[in-house]
Image: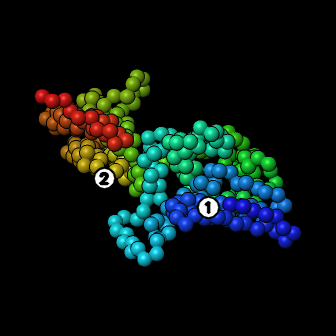
Amino acid sequence: MTLRRYSDGWQYSATIPEQIRAIDLVRLLTDLLLAEYAERFSDREVPPPLWLRVGLAEIIYRAGGPSLLTPRGVPVVIEGRMPDPYLGTRELLLHKAPLGYADLSLPTRTHLRGANWEHFRASAHLFTRQLLQRREGHRELHKFIRLLPRFKNSQFAFLNAYQLGDPKTGTKTTLLDVEKWWTIARTQFRSRDRSNNWSTERSLAQLKEALHVIPATGQPIPLQQRLGELDLAAQRQQLENTLFRLKTVAVNAPPGMQSLIRDYYNTLNDYYRKRRLGPGTTPVPAPNDPLARSTIRQLNLLDTIMADVRQLNANTAFGKTVSPPRP
């Protein structure tokens, strides 16, 4: 890509080989458009940051899918679910945490070589898309690009364009605010799948937490252990809280976790109904009867199943499968 400054503005040109990968062509066109937009009212060359060039190109390319750039005369048939906007990026960043803002803004040569380049590309893609998904994301990006000619360092333009600190204080965004926002954004991204469900690992952690009771002192203990200790009024309060939390976990958990969560919910809900726990429950000691013993056995069995699911998830993380030992 070459550019020349004339009295009436800038002129941009690019030499394209006869054969070029689709993503490379998109990156080239994105670079041209970004340069023109940033330098439209500037008398000097304004290079946009690399993370923005790479991130926008990835978003544009993935938004169009295979039909964005189709070879002439080649039919294209698209079937199945809508394309995942994070396809490729999601798998890579689940295995390796995204780069921080400092590394995205000032990448070293090491960041841009070999497998590290793919990591940088994926991190830039996620960072740019997360910025655009903010409530004022498009307006903030427009302001950021327009501010680039005013600063020699793009980070200062970024801090002036984006409000990532506490809006109540009205203070200017700092680099620490950017890193805090980015840490939260990338953590949330890595904890959910393409359907916006929690990952299996996070779902298991939330399920385990919902099924434990935190006493006044000491460590959390399994709910079934407390069923034989709490009076009926305390059981009612604890069970209502646990049933509500199980519903929350079910809404966010992936499909493969639903049956286990449902079994836990049905077991506790049956106990709640058969015990006739309700608004008028009195604080009398819980009886050690067949209903309590049966419920505790069922919860222990479900805990064993959950432990197996957790082990299976650990063994198959990131595509790695650990074969069971031979008998």
Q: Position of residue 223 (x, y in %)?
A: 30, 33
Is 222 left or right of 181, judged from the image as shown? left
Foreground of the two, 154 or 287: 154
Q: Which residue is mark 1?
A: 28
Q: Is residue 182 above or below residue 83?
A: above
Residue 74, given in percent of the width and then of the height, sits at 41, 74
Q: Split into 4 quadrants, where in the image is the N terminus? A: bottom right
- Real-space CA distance between mark 2 and mark 1, rounded to the nearest whole angstrom: 40 Å
Residue 137 placed where, x, y %? 63, 59
46 or 185, nearer to the observer: 46
The image position of residue 216, as x and y in percent, is: 42, 26
Label 1 is placed on what type of residue?
Leu
Q: Residue at x 63, y 55 (%)?
A: 53
Left/right placement of residue 277 relative to residue 184 reads left
Residue 221 falls left or right of residue 6:
left
- The type of colouring in the image is rainbow
Callout 2: helix, strand or loop?
helix
Classify the position of the C terminus by image quarter: top left
The residue labelled by disc 2 is: 255
Q: Amino acid at mark 2?
A: Pro
